[in-house]
């Protein structure tokens, strides 16, 4: 059907497609004065590899909540003239199952097998809201609230968010089995994952970003490990990613150490690398488009 299955070449084409989306996003933010930062594996890749982690297939960008909500308002009009490019969020699509927004490109498809339920998705970059987070007793209570909504999300869409085939060790496997049983017996929200996600959003927005000493990325795979001092993000500073300047947190070292530990500059052994369980499909007539939209410096890396 004119398609090529996942290969190293296809991974690179996916990365270049995502890079073009990053450039579109950066231009929108600069045009409208919106704050954003590279985060997670994308920030790590910028510092350790000068761009994408070689085996990574996604992009993590974050925005303070007020900037994020403004972005959701502005982006549809900004993206309207770009064929195949779109925006999806829990506020625009009740069938959407994730808390963060995504900018998508239909020219590259990804078959995502990271959970029990196989998902066919368009290439995307994640846009993550950063909310305020308190200290002391208030922090403990907010964690309890957020843990409740994360458990409710698992009960509403267990097969979508959990891969029971993945080996997590004895304790991890036992915990997953317990959650799976719990999700079949105790389901106060049934299959209404949209209601759960909106309630999670409302809980996150309890503390305003600019009025809080800390900030949280609840949507990270590492959960509560991504609670930072807000000043670590600050006003941001330039960082090069695939030969293009983007915005990083003001204190890159503190953020990366909090997420990955002090040895974040040392790549993990090959057997421990976070290879995402996905298959990349690039239609033959789209294979040149990613190269055309990426910077000349990145296309030399193919």
Image (spheres, rainbow, N blue to C red):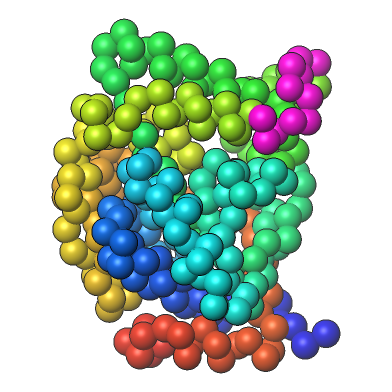
The picture quadrant where one finds residue 59 is bottom left
Residue sitting nearer the eye, 240 or 107: 107
Tell me the residue at 70%/83% (across/down): 283
- In x, y percent, where is residue 44? 32, 56
Residue 158 inside the magenta-drawn segment: no
**Magenta: predominant secondary structure element?**
loop
Quadrant containing the C terminus is bottom left
Image vertical order of residue 238 relative to residue 19, above or below: above
Image vertical order of residue 287 relative to residue 210, above or below: below
| Magenta residues, start to end | 185-195
The picture quadrant where one finds residue 180 is top right
Tell me the residue at 21%/65% (across/down): 239
The picture quadrant where one finds residue 110 is bottom right
Residue sitting nearer the eye, 221 or 205: 205
Q: Can residue 69 be spotted in the picture?
A: yes
- In x, y percent, where is residue 4? 71, 82
């Amino acid at each position: 059907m004119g398609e090529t299955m996942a290969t190293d070449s296809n991974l690179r084409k996916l990365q270049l497609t995502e890079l073009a989306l990053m450039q579109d996003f950066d231009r929108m933010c600069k045009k409208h004065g919106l704050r954003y930062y590279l985060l997670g594996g994308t920030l790590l890749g910028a510092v350790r590899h000068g761009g994408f982690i070689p085996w990574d297939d996604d992009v993590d960008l974050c925005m303070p909540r007020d900037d994020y909500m403004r972005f959701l308002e502005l982006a549809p009009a900004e993206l309207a003239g770009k064929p195949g490019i779109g925006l999806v969020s829990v506020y625009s699509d009740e069938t959407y199952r994730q808390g963060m927004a995504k900018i998508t490109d239909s020219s590259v498809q990804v078959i995502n097998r990271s959970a029990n339920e196989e998902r066919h998705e368009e290439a995307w970059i994640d846009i993550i809201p950063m909310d305020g987070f308190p200290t002391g007793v208030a922090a403990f209570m907010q964690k309890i609230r957020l843990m409740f909504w994360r458990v409710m999300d698992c009960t509403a869409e267990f097969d979508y968010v959990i891969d029971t085939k993945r080996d997590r060790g004895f304790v991890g496997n036992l915990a997953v089995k317990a959650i799976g049983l719990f999700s079949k017996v105790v389901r106060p929200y049934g299959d209404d994952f949209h209601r759960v996600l909106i309630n999670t959003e409302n809980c996150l927005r309890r503390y305003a970003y600019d009025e809080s000493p800390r900030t949280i990325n609840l949507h990270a795979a590492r959960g509560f490990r991504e609670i930072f001092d807000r000043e670590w993000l600050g006003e941001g500073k330039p960082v090069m990613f695939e030969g293009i300047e983007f915005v990083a947190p003001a204190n890159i070292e503190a953020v990366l150490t909090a997420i990955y530990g002090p040895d974040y500059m040392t790549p993990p052994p090959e057997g421990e690398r976070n290879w995402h369980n996905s298959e990349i499909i690039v239609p033959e007539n789209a294979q040149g488009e990613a190269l055309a939209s990426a910077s000349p410096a990145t296309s030399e890396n193919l």
